Image (cartoon, grey):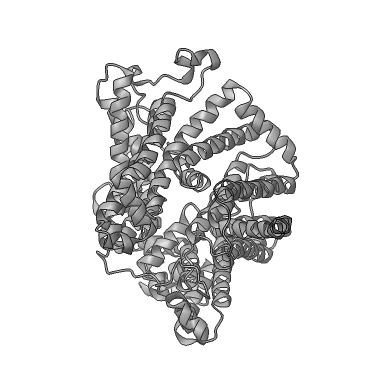
Amino acid sequence: MDYATFLQMLDSTLRLATPLMLACIAGLYSERAGIFDIGLEGKMLAAAMCAGAAAALSGSVWWGLLAGIGGSLVFAAIHGVTSITFRGNQLISGVALNFLASGLTVLVAQSMFGQGGRTPPLNGPARFQPIALPFAEEARAIPVIGPFYDEVISGHPLPVYAAFAVVALTWWVLYRTRFGLRLRAVGENPAAVDTAGVSVVGLRYAAVMVTGVLCGLAGAYMATALQAGFGKEMTAGRGYIALAALIFAKWRPVAAMWACLLFGFFQALANRPDVVEAVVQVKVPVPFLTALPYVLTVLVLAGFVGKAIPPRAGGEPYVKER
Amino acid sequence: MDRLPRWADVALVPLVSLILAFAIAALVILAIGQDPWEAITVMVQGSVMNAYGWGYTLYYATSFMFTGLAVCVAFHASMFNIGGEGQALLGGLGVALACLFVPWPHWSLALIGATASAAAFGAVWAAIPAWLQAKRGSHIVITTIMFNYIAASLLQYLLVNTLKPVGQADPASANFPPATHLPALNDIPLLNLVFTKAVPANVTLFIALAMAVLVWVLLWHTRLGYQIRAFGKSEAGARYAGINPTFVIMVVMLISGGLAGMMAINNVMGEAERLLGNSASGAGFIGIAVALMGRNHPLGVVLAALLFGFLFQGGAELGLWTKIPIEMRIVVQGLVILFTGALDVMVRMLLVRIFALFRPRTMEAA
């Protein structure tokens, strides 16, 4: 593989890793607060549909983004009410919301646009446009680093850069703020947080809502930047890959970024079987590359690649008085 | 919180949940500018008002009985087997291998062989997550989700690279030999008086019903069933009583995976008569809804499977005859899971309030 192809692969890795990263960090907030969320997939899908529809109707990607976040927040709120207020089974609620999103998105898109469950193709200001970073053109002349800067670092739509900012911000929030400390505490020992006079319910709702906002961003990126509009089941299991990355990263933000970049790289490889074949000299079947993130996650879960210990109070509804 | 009377807990809670789910579904249909009454009429007409419709309803219900029982058995040991989809896919592989590579003289023998093979493949696929849960403490929900995706990739690979006959374009196995074709309900004497047209429902239906009985016997009338339920109620208690947790987790997941795998004899052997890429088509997930709706009792599972068979066939009719997309059935499915599985506390609180309203009056009368 020559350097140019390698840069192309890294470039598509970044684009494919972005929704994973956003969804993964989204899941991190919820799970760190003790609320399991296997509904990342559904929230992303709902957001993608809302974003695609709003961007198509208004012609502005910003309305799309707003609608995407709104749609995702509705699903997050249902998950919150179910698992915090009514102390329902968080896993079952997640499964149900994934189904709801899968069906409702097609239903709404079909009744709004009548194009077989898709939203109309977006172009121009209805999509996030690539941003050329300063001196990208000029830097090309510098050997090795120049093309890397121009091809890989520069020229992505805003959400790609936002995803990395979210990772940094999340690290800071989680480990350097009072909210972060309480968030981590409520996922480990909610009774202690309650005793300290901090509202468990409030913290958990806040976490679930942050999850909603970030999933909304991920879905909006899918529909308005990665692709030009919403299509049926367009998230294609990314919510579950993000969940896998979260476990792979042992619920830590920076590790989550690396895990998502790795899984994004696998997706980029799966899109280019010719490159893979050229490198390893053996024909590697595409399904093998598709399955790799899941296999790795199982290995991590099994404790063969370090032990993944989830937040202790994860999945347990908090009952104040006994 | 007050307790509900037993009959209310068993019958009223699921019924109210179902009514709430359908009420929201009706609102969804209204919101997309369609007529809910027309929708329910079309669904009922196309699925339960004639033998032909029943032929499809029962066909889907058969699949859901298997996957529903699979989830139900695991639930009794507090294991949430969300991997029915992957186990059913692997079951399909088992059926295909048995049907393609063994020269069966008669369909009845082929049925026995394929059933065993399907169950074995499904069980093996559940065994790995089970072992990881029992020995390494990996959460069964996450591992079974991962195994769903791994199964889909594995099948995709096998269909494209090994099972697909030379010269065929679509990724599917060769057609199974005629000796392995199962009799549909319209081929069975006496039943063919009712089912006059060719329907996909086949003899597998009776296997599914037999399995429901077997699961009932297993759970409530055997030592193993007692161990499973004791383990599900309290792992610490079961351990103290000398029940081996590894043994229970392994056995219950093997049974669960086997049941999910057996679903494949209905769709792969009984209907498609060849192995297709997405053979399970979501039935593994519907099993979750069926088990929840059926309150984890085999009889409940059979009834809930019939309900979901009706929803599935009715949903297809909606897609055919109305402007409501076929995806409506996924929405209803999601709503049923949400209300029966996750919001059951809400429904119960609601019912407790209502029951409390009536209580003082009866006391005054007495």
The image quadrant that residue B119 belongs to is top left
Give x and y (percent) for residue B366: 70, 55
Residue at the spot x=73%, y=55% of the render? B365
Residue at the spot x=25%, y=60% of the render? B135
Residue at the spot x=26%, y=54% of the render? B131
The image quadrant that residue A128 belongs to is bottom right
Residue at the spot x=59%, y=67% of the render? A85
Give left or right: position of B131 versus B347: left
Give left or right: position of A188 versus B40: left
Image quadrant where one finds the N terminus of chain A:
bottom left
Front-lying residue, B132 or A247: B132
Front-lying residue, B118 or B242: B242
- When the figure is inspected, residue A123 is found, relative to residue B11, above or below; the finding is below
User: Could one spot residue A1 in this view of the protein?
Assistant: no
Total numbered labels placed on residues in the image: 0
Give x and y (percent) for residue B36: 72, 40
User: Could one spot residue B164 in this view of the protein?
Assistant: yes
Q: Residue furthest front?
A: B366
The image quadrant that residue B211 belongs to is top left
Give left or right: position of A228 versus B265: right
Front-lying residue, A172 or B283: B283
Give x and y (percent) for residue B216: 39, 40
Give x and y (percent) for residue A70: 65, 64
Front-lying residue, A256 or B113: B113
- When the figure is inspected, residue A6 is found, relative to residue A102, above or below; the finding is below
